Every structure is written in C-alpha cells, then in structure tokens.
C-alpha cells in the first residue's frame, strides 16, 4: 500500500515524446534487437537497448507481446513514468479504470503509481521509454486489489473475461 507518496510530473513530457517519436520512426526495431538477449518477464520478451540514448534520464526497450495473453498488472514506484510507443499491432491498455484501444503509431503515457496492464493482439510490439530509467525494484506486480494505485482485481478479471484469447486471436505459445 502506498502512503504519503507524491506523484511528480516528468518535466517537459511533450519534448520527451517528440524526441522519441522522431528517433523511433527512423529505427528498424527488428534490427535493433538482433544482438540483444531478451528477458522473459510479465510483459513478454523485453529487449533492453542501452545503446540508444535519449534526452537524459530515461531508458529504452522493445517489448514483444506477441506470445502472451495479458501483460501482468503492475505499477511503477519511485516516480517512474512509462511511455509506450506502439510499433505494430493493437491492444487494450488499461490504466487504472481507463480502457484504451491502441494501434500502431499511438503513444500512451503511464504516470507513476498508476496500475496498468495490456491485453495484446497477436502482433503487438511496443517501444517503452521509462523516466527515470527503468529499475526492476520500481516494478510492482499486482495480484490483489490495491485502491491506492487504482487496481481492482474483480474489474481486472471482468476485463480479461470480456477480452478472451479466442476472440482476440491471442497466440499463447
């Protein structure tokens, strides 16, 4: 449970988004990940790309969600903001009680201390930018209701049931 934590806005998030949109549009993500060993985590295969530098205090990764049914619900602690740049496919991204249907080219900003999860289609791949840089200690999985970060386990289960694997064409190999 979160107590007495203040959410601090990332300074100039628009500039950060613009920079990464311009950077990403000139990159071939498939070439980027060829030399990188992925980590198999709750969000699929994640390729951390330390060779790509941003404007300052951020990290960059490619998350391949093509082989998962749902990215585990979680939030980021310690004022860590996460930005998704949808590279291909579509998905339902849920941030607290907001359901966003996203597709290639969309950008989603997830503020710190906000529960979120993703139900991808069979082609969903994103670039993820975290500021400050991603720290595994700030990644907090959710397995029970936690109102302080906007996560309701019953609502999560309802959303999963409404977006079944068969209806969305999910490949869960």
Image: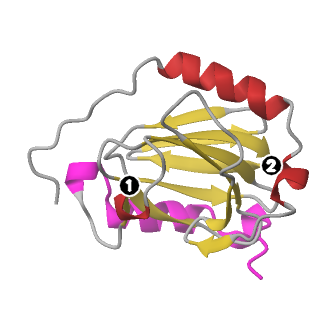
Residue 170 located within the stretch drawn in magenta: yes
Rendered location of residue 42, percent (x, y) = 55, 70
Is tag 2's residue or tag 1's residue first in the polypeptide sequence?
Answer: 1
Q: Which residue is mark 1?
A: 75
Q: Which residue is mark 2?
A: 89
Residue in the picture at 77% in, 82% down: 173
The local crowd at label 1, few if under 14, some if 14 to 19, many if 20 or more residues have their Cα within 10 Å, is many
- Give the secondary structure at mark 2: loop
> On the rendered structure, is 135 left or right of 85?
left
Question: In the rendered picture of this protein, how many numbered marks are placed on residues?
Answer: 2
Where 87 falls versus 56 (above or below)?
below
Q: Which residues are magenta?
A: 147-173
Q: How is the image coloured?
A: secondary structure
Nearer the camera: disc 2 or disc 1: 1
Q: Main secondary structure of the magenta part?
A: helix
Rendered location of residue 140, percent (x, y) = 35, 63
Residue in the picture at 49% in, 22% down: 13
The quarter in which the N terminus is drawn is: bottom left
Q: Which mark is residue 151?
A: none
């Amino acid at each position: 449970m979160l107590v007495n934590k203040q959410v601090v806005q990332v300074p100039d998030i628009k500039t950060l988004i613009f920079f990464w949109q311009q950077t990403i549009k000139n990159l071939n993500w498939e070439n980027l990940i060829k030399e990188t060993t992925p980590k198999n985590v709750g969000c699929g295969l994640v390729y951390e790309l330390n060779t790509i530098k941003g404007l300052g205090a951020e990290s960059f990764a490619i998350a391949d969600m093509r082989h998962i049914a749902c990215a585990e619900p979680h939030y980021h602690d310690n004022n860590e903001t996460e930005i998704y740049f949808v590279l291909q496919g579509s998905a339902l991204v849920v941030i607290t009680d907001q359901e966003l249907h996203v597709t290639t080219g969309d950008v989603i900003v997830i503020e710190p201390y906000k529960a979120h999860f993703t139900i991808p289609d069979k082609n969903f791949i994103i670039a993820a930018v975290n500021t400050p840089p991603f720290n595994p200690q700030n990644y907090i999985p959710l397995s029970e209701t936690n109102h302080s970060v906007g996560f309701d386990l019953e609502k999560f289960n309802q959303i999963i049931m409404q977006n079944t694997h068969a209806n969305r064409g999910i490949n869960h190999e």
